[in-house]
Amino acid sequence: MDLSFYIQLLLNGVVIGVIYALVAMGLSLIFGVLEIVNFAHGEFYMLGAMLAYFLSMNVGLGYWPAVLVVTAVAVALGYVLYEALLGSLRGQSFERSILLTLGLSMVLQNGAVFLFTTTPRMMQTRYSYSNVIVGDVRVSVMRLFALGLGLLAFAALYLILYRTRVGRAMRGVAQNREAALMVGIDPRAVSRLAVAIGIGLSGLAGAALAPVYAVHPLMGFSFVFKAFAIIIIGGLGNISGAAIAAVALGILESVAGGFLPLVMADALAFIAMIAILLLRPQGLFGRGVRV
Amino acid sequence: MRGGWLRAFLVVLGVAALFAIPRVTGNEYVLALGVSFATFSVLSGGLNLVYGYTGLLSFAQVGFFGIGGYTAALLVTEQDWSLWAGAAAGGVLAALVGLVIGYSSLRLSRHAFAIVSLSFALLCLIVALEWVSLTRGAMGIPGLPVPTLSLPGGLRWRLGRPADFYYLLLGFAVVAHAVIYLVVTSRLGRAMRAIKLNEPLAQSQGVNPLSYKLLAIALSALLAGIVGGLFVFYLTIVDPSIFDFYYTETMLIMVIIGGPGSFWGVLGSSAVLSALPDLLRFTTDLRMVLYGAVLIAAMLLFPGGVGGWLQRRRLARWRRPGAVAP
């Protein structure tokens, strides 16, 4: 148990935390702008990973082109999802939105099981067996790529939200829907973009992690529940809160996984969520209780 | 109420017919479908109380179901409790857990309740899989003994045949639905519906929403826990698959199709959906794809379900010019 062991755990935790953050931020963005909890969010993470797998193993695309294609497809799917399903939900329909997206998740997940079976697959790339070694710390190149992609996506999301007009409009709708309407923001356009970005981030996360973990149709299912816990911990609809909570959870899980039985690491997210709800219901970074 | 006696007569007739089935046919497949109907109808009836009447979307029912199952199985096999006591303890424990979850999350919002109830169900699954010293992990507790129940009058009833479990679960389902029916047609049910329709208005009329919500959650948890305790002895095994999300999805579909807030609608859809997919011989994957598509279609086209559609039609008939108000 020396220092390099801890650094190793910490680094693995940061990588998985950043990927959690991609999924959780998309979920949080969609909740903030549309007030919809997207149950099918994890399935797009799964679809992203599956698509990346098939693009690289069956079509022969490299890692980077595969990631690009998957992200583009996911953004397009986000547009379709909004136009086909979510756009018809308006106001006061929280439960309907959950059930609708739950139905979508059932279709996607069980459809994928039906078509591809639950056999885990491993995506191989040119760099699959390469490692970067600094002192005693050894990190696989694929994890570093995933980390890099995650940070890149953070930066892009930050720029969109804080440096563009449409980003400001998005934050406006999330803060106060009526006021945003009053100053002439088109909620449909903003919502459509928010869903596209959210689904895009989820697909990107799946593609980025496909060479690191096994790919199978049930992978999105457990992932999305952790993302729910993260957005509650970070404060519902609070995007930066979700990102911080996600990275913290990734590190915590990784460190806990080094010492505690695996189950504790898995239960950690839920236990943290219940504790936060009891002690600080608005979330760690919430400003006040949202009704 | 107009036709009240007729309805009561039909209900008694229906229940008697259900109880007579084992006398007509000893077919185990028919009885298995009957047991599945009785079990799911209690689960979906409880969910209807929480979601349909009180407006709280809950994913926790399956957790209560499994807690009841594990509690009863452990108490009977390791502490030599009777099945009655074990199932009752399972129900009470489930209700207490339900109160804790409800109280902690409803302080925030009903949105938080939905998400927390979901995480709770998943946490149950993790605990069942990993707390090996208590639950024996993925292997579960197989070989549950054939229970013998003591009945009033010193009789002993050994549940050795499939028909015995059919009688037991059907009997409990009748009791459970009677309780649910009494609640939803009473002042309590009216208050719950008021909370669902307009919480601030209900509050301004002196209704404390939290206590009614907690009552609905606790009652549905109690019923789900007891039925879980009875059901595992029918299966003769309890393992982590009792917390499977499949149960949640199935009971949600039953409530949505039957019509949230419609007692008879949900009961009817429970009967149809327990039997139909099995008779049509779908594989589970395909059945869930179909359920998902039905859920999407229901949410987009008729969120009120069959019960809601019938209610709308009835209202439209009353509103027609010249119609006599009942």
Image: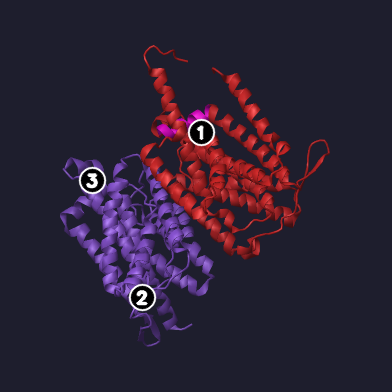
Q: Are marks 3 and 1 in contact (CB under 8 Å)?
A: no
* Location of residue A129 by image quarter: bottom left
Could you tell me how many numbered marks the image carries? 3
Q: Residue A15: image x %, image y %?
A: 36, 72
Q: Mark 3 or mark 1: which is in front?
A: 1
Q: Residue B294: image x %, image y %?
A: 43, 44
Residue at 35% across, 71% down: A58
For numbered disc 2, what is the local secondary structure? helix
Q: Are marks 2 and 1 on the same chain?
A: no
For numbered disc 3, what is the local secondary structure? helix
- Quickly name the residue at label 2: A143
Q: Residue A277: image x %, image y %?
A: 44, 52
- Residue B239 can be seen in this image: yes
Q: Main secondary structure of the magenta part?
A: helix
Q: Color used for chain A?
A: purple
- Please say if A283 is above or below B295: below
> Disc number at residue A188?
3
- Residue B89 can be seen in this image: no
Magenta residues, start to end: B187-198
Of all chains in the rendering, the one displayed in red is B
Q: Residues under labels 3 and 1: Cα distance?
A: 36 Å
